[in-house]
Image (tube, rainbow, N blue to C red):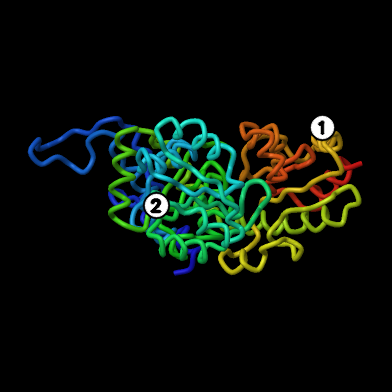
Amino acid sequence: MKIGSKLIHNNGAVDKITGALSIPIYQASTFHQDDIDNPGKFDYSRSGNPTRKALEDTIAFIEGGKQGFAFSSGMAATSSVLSIFKTGDHLLVSKDVYGGTHRIVTKFFNNFGLEVTFVDTSDLANIEPAIKKNTKAIFLETPSNPLLKITDLKGAIKIAGKHKLISIVDNTFMSPYLQRPLELGADIVVHSATKFIGGHSDVIAGLVVVNSHELAKRIYFVQNSFGAIAGPQDCWLLLRGLKTLKVRMDFQQKNALQLARYLADHSKVKKVFYPGLDSHQGKSIHLSQADGGGAVLSFKLEDGSLAKRFMDNVKMAVVAVSLGGVETIVSYPVKMSHANVPKRERKAQEITANLIRVSVGLEEIEDLLSDFAKALK
């Protein structure tokens, strides 16, 4: 079965009790036990809920994993995965990782003795020299946020396997429709499901899928102990969002390619970052592991003042944090997604005041291009 069909026909497609084509929202905190010596499948919704289980089974099926987990946010998902490690463990993390991930490892988990080294994983030669005796995992993000840097997943995962490291991939930008890291050998995949999986800017949630039962036990222990779970209403919204993921992303990435080409030819645009462009470094690697360039791009204008004027004047797009919605969203990384990354590090990563990130939506491309043209004037 192809991925587009899997999004429709999966374990979360039909309610096994009633045959309903929409899994019910089990808005319950606790469940009656007929036999106290033989408890039922569900007892307390922190530990398990039928709507959440339908979502977790569905994302595991789509990603090709052993077990899925739904969390209250993308950062709850990432933090829960990082919580399987202990004091003295060392992790390698992609240098240009999402700002929230950078913040949690440098300002929270460091307090508990978790060591982190940031590595430019877009060049595989940088990985092995950074591995230490206590290195336990490598955390990858490709395409990266916000410069869309590409990491060779198969190559990085091979290095991880050689050194018996757990490979973790943040797959938010691509979604399971366009890229499935577990099929490439990764151990854990993480999604901010708030983005393309939800797809309508109306839910906050995170998803994790693992490729082994041993990792599943470790993740479930954290999920059940911390309780940072996705509620049944949010899980239902994600199940609904998955059904239209293909058609949304097909249209959105088609729009993104046209917008990227337009911006690349504009006199006021210094550089465009989009894996679908021939000029993008790592394009061939990206298209060998993903089914398209995705719907997120970034571009640099002549200076920061022009970037701010553009955001003041753009009308068709909303200026906001987040991405992946049906509407085009323009973000300003230095003040939004990467505001907590120290200025020196932002500068070293080329996340500058003239950089704008765009999550392309479902508008008619002619209207979007016209609006961008007016804003750039």
| Residue in view at x 41 percent, y 63 percent | 161
> What is the secondary structure assignment of the residue under circle 2?
loop
* Residue furthest left as drawn: 37
**In front: mark 1 or mark 2?**
2
**Residue marked by disc 2:** 133
Which residue corresponds to the image point at 57% horizontal and 48% vertical from the top-left?
196
Q: Quadrant of residue 316?
A: top right
Horizontal placement of 352 versus 104: left or right? right
- Characterize the local packing of mark 2: few (<14), some (14-19) or many (20 or more) Cα atoms within 10 angstroms: few
- Residue 146's x, y, as percent? 66, 46
Res 119 label: none
What residue did someone put label 1 on?
A: 312
Indicate the position of residue 205 as horizontal and vertical percent values. Answer: 48, 39
Q: Is residue 126 visible?
A: yes
Query: What secondary structure is marked by label 1?
Result: helix
Q: Is residue 182 left or right of residue 314?
A: left
For disc 1, the neighbor class at 10 Å (few under 14, some 14 to 19, many from 20) is few
Distance between mark 1 and mark 2 Cα atoms: 50 Å
Name the N-terminal-most of marks 1 and 2: 2
Point 70% across, 48% down: residue: 360
Quadrant placement of the C terminus: top right
Residue 187 relative to residue 217: left or right = right
